[in-house]
Image (spheres, rainbow, N blue to C red):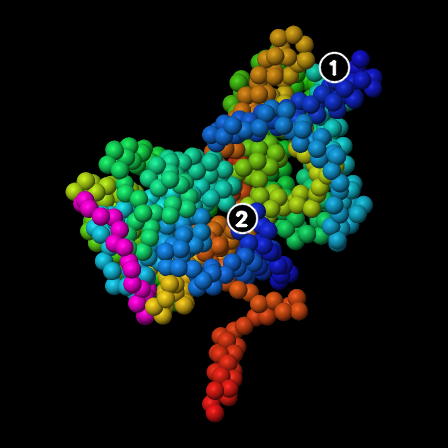
Amino acid sequence: MNNTLFSFLVFPGFLFIAVIGLLFMGIDRKLSARFQWRMGPPLWQPFVDFMKLLSKEVVLPKNVNKPMFFLSPLMGLSGVIVASLLLFRAPLNPQGAFIGDLVVFIYLLLLIPLSVILGASSSGNPLSSVGGSREIKMVLSYELPFILAIFTAVLKVGSLRMGDFLLYQSQRGALFLTSPSCVFAFVAAFLVIHAKLALAPFDIPEAETEIMGGTLIEYSGPLLALFYLVRAILYFTLTAFLVFIFWGGITFTGWGAVLSLLKILLVLFLVIVVKNINPRIRIDQAVRFFWTRVFVLSIIGMGLAIIGW
Amino acid sequence: MARKTVIPIGPFHPLQEEPEHFTLTVEGERVVDVDMELGYNHRGIEKLAEAKSWQQITFLVARICGICSTSHPIAYCNAVEDLCKVEIPERAKYIRTIVGELERIHSHLLWLGLAGHFLGYNTVWMWAWKWREPVLDIFEALTGNRNHYDMLLPGGVRRDIDEKNIPWIKKEMDEIKKKLDMITKAVLDDPVILSRLKGVGVLPPEEAKNYGAVGPTVRASGVKIDVRKDDPYAAYDKVDWDVITCENGDLLDKVVVRILETFESIKIMEKCLDALKEVKGEIITPIREFPPGEGIGHHEAPRGETFHYVKSDGGAGPIRHKVRAPTYVNLPTCKVTAPGCQIADAVIILAAIDPCYCCTERVGIVRDKKKEWLTQQDLVKLSWEKTERLRSKYAR
């Protein structure tokens, strides 16, 4: 079932990642609510929200650039789906993918902020253009530490193919448990995926109380639902990616599947904890944070990896 | 030079759920100017008051604002008692103080939560509001209502505080003190919060005085103004307490001032509750005569000085009633504090004065769908014209 339509559309393709992603979003909402001493919505609330948004009409703003406005959520969705496919098909057939799919994965992840920026700037709203410019600054600040952190792991494994990470870690144990360099890289990558998910303290481009949801302010109906789905899938893909690269990889068979799910949930839990114990920071503070502290962290990881730790 | 963009905050901005309109002129992320506009929700309270009796107005002014719903009645009753030269019973004074301070505690907790929300720190928001809940329960037990307590009447208070309520109120206050201690440590030791608040939105003391700002806004800048101390009323001169001030006038100090004030309020409350055991007697002096004349009254509301003025011709109600809420004078200080900061900071700076728009609303004139801006000169000119009109009408 490796290359059939089923594997692209259902498992581990679109349907699988979408359902788990929305479920992860539900976990986030429920757990955040419990942190804040609220009851919170039921776990399936994101599904309901998504279905409801699909049935709503699209309200077009006056000064909108229509093609851009319609295409950018599709671009984000296709980016995240293809990236997720690359990631989740690797455990099925570790040697099956082409060499360098890790690089493609990182590139495809960039499509998502790009789509958000395009969508924001095409809507013609001053608040969303502020959000868009903030998103650009965020991308510029977190992308380099992210690539450095990933390439620390690449140095250890010696391959750019994601499947090789699985083989390497199944033979010598999880990367961030066995090598000090990858501990640094893991922390840096964790902070970056937090920013990629746009959660507090890095929810700066959206900043509900400052610029009213910034980048997504003019989106409504099915188009908003698509962005919502992109965000939901990111919850799953990014946390799984972190486990995949640094923590023994993921599998879909036997007890390994349960174990990898537990690891992913633990990373998700950490993300939710960080989200709930921090206020939003300013954009200049975020840029400084990523360019000094996280960058230094990933450079240290890289240096340690080069000297062989 | 970067292009200037105008960012509207309001009238439907989700930040402050009341109708107000700030216009931020920004260059990139930097705010260069701020303008504000009120008058979306004018309710004509002062005009309504002229058609009501002296007692009824107490309940009308309580409904000016849901949060300061005892500050306005206290100020109004002070004004009426000033008009009638009535001394209220001792016990009523203490009860007024207790209600007033309880309101400060709940209002400051509410603001603390909102400040957390504006910073994107929703955990603080929810927790602060959860801790505010016991205060509302106390209100319900003492006055019958969670909000709009309606405890006051000119001449005293309407309900007595039962002796058996005092122990559990004190217990709840101790709980709140513990929680406040915890949140103070958690919030003020957090480097991320400090980086957002310290040195941002500084209001220098001289500017604070120039703008005539009041309440915690100005006390954070180190100006020691507090009506409760400067012109004592109710039981504020009978218990021992301090006016809290800070020095820097930045956002952090505005938080600190409010948290410390909450502790101070709990202190005042506990002393008043103790005093209630000794001070017995009537709780209201019925006022039968409302002589012609003027009366002024003020109260240190959680946000600053609330001022009421009444003018009587000896009838059943005032012929003029004037309300000035603290936000009205605090709001323009944003002109000093907001420019130069970032959009992200502007939001919390605007919120740091703890604005309350329903207290503040004034008439805005809209003619032919165009907003007319009246400057001071215009108003003076209008008034001269009116005088001239009257003179030409009655001169002969």
Picture coordinates of residue A83, whole percent (x, y)? 72, 28
Magenta residues, start to end = B279-296
Label 1 – label 2 distance at C-alpha: 54 Å
Q: Horizontally, is A46 left or right of B59 in the view?
A: right
Query: Tag on residue B317?
Result: none
Which amino acid, by three-letter code, is at mark 2?
Glu
1 and 2 marks on the same chain: no
Q: Horizontally, is A195 left or right of B74 in the view?
A: right
Picture coordinates of residue A62, whole percent (x, y)? 75, 53
Q: Horizontally, is A181 left or right of B238 in the view?
A: right
Q: Is residue B63 magenta?
A: no
Contact (Cβ within 8 Å) of mark 1 with mark 2: no
Identified at 73% across, 50% down, the residue is A61
Identified at 40% across, 41% down, the residue is B145
Q: In which quarter of the image is the N terminus of chain B?
A: bottom right
Query: Tag on residue A93?
Result: 1
Q: Is residue A15 above or below residue A122?
A: above
Quadrant in the rendering for residue A44:
top right
- Please name whichever residue, B79 or A207, is drawn nearer the observer in this view of the structure: B79
Query: Tag on residue B17?
Result: 2
